[in-house]
Amino acid sequence: EPEVTQTPSHQVTQMGQEVILRCVPISNHLYFYWYRQILGQKVEFLVSFYNNEISEKSEIFDDQFSVERPDGSNFTLKIRSTKLEDSAMYFCASTQDSGANVLTFGAGSRLTVL
Amino acid sequence: DQQVKQNSPSLSVQEGRISILNCDYTNSMFDYFLWYKKYPAEGPTFLISISSIKDKNEDGRFTVFLNKSAKHLSLHIVPSQPGDSAVYFCAASRRTGNQFYFGTGTSLTVIP
């Protein structure tokens, strides 16, 4: 069964450092997402991406965050200058179409900012 | 602004009995709802969905009920099995949008 793959599974970084989280969505999917879950809290929407541009973003997704699809397969989330509160599980997801479709999630990347 | 709420953080059920997980939403524009199951150290996996044109959708042991007037949905698992022990998230979206809103999750423990 096709799956969304994420790397790294766990990254530890110092506050102020740049972090790039990588995702390979399912090959025939067109919509890509990043969500995060701070420990003990809800899964929060960060950004959606379609046709090589951001289609929606939340208030969390400020200027410190950026997304990119550098080639035909990878979808990356960059945090320019990490803060302690960026520590969370980051989930990449993809779907074939928008709206009434199923999001398929990756296993997540745990980011720990010290 | 929490548009999707799961007010029970945890639930324990005896094996073989029914598990009922509840979810409320505030945005009347939502017209598509999903339930996801999440095991520790894994991403959420899709379980079952329902469109707002229906009030019930069944898939094996899992049934989702939607009450649009109450803005409430529930997931029934019958019979519950120990392997069902996980965190369950409900999610909502609009067909015309591409953002999915998630609840905080309910941790289900099925006791053998």
Image (tube, helix red, strand yellow):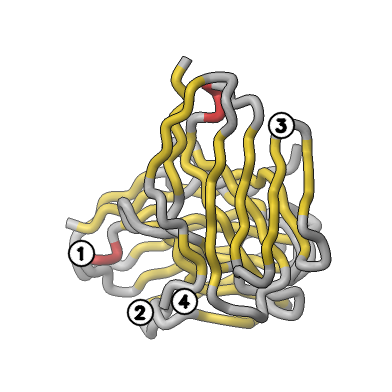
Q: Residue A9: x and y, percent?
A: 43, 43
Which numbered circle lies on residue A66? 4
Mark 2 or mark 1: name the one nearer the start of the chain: 2
Residue type, label 4: Ser
Q: Which mark is residue B71?
A: none
Question: What residue is shown with label 3?
Answer: B61
- The residue where tag 2 is placed is A64
Query: Where B56 falls versus B51 (above or below)?
Result: above
**Of the residues tagged 2 and 1, which is closer to the observer?**
1
Q: Residue B61 in the image: x percent, y percent?
A: 71, 31
Q: What secondary structure is found at the residue carrying circle 3?
A: loop
- Which residue, given by chain and number where applicable, does mark 1 sit on? A84
Q: Can you say which quadrant of the picture contains the N terminus of chain A?
A: top right
User: Under tag 4, what secondary structure?
Assistant: strand
Judging from the image, mark 3 belongs to the subunit labelled B
**Which amino acid, by three-letter code, is at mark 3?**
Arg
Residue at figure coordinates x 43%, y 69% from the top left: A78
* Residue B20 quadrant: top right
Amino acid type shown at disc 2? Gln
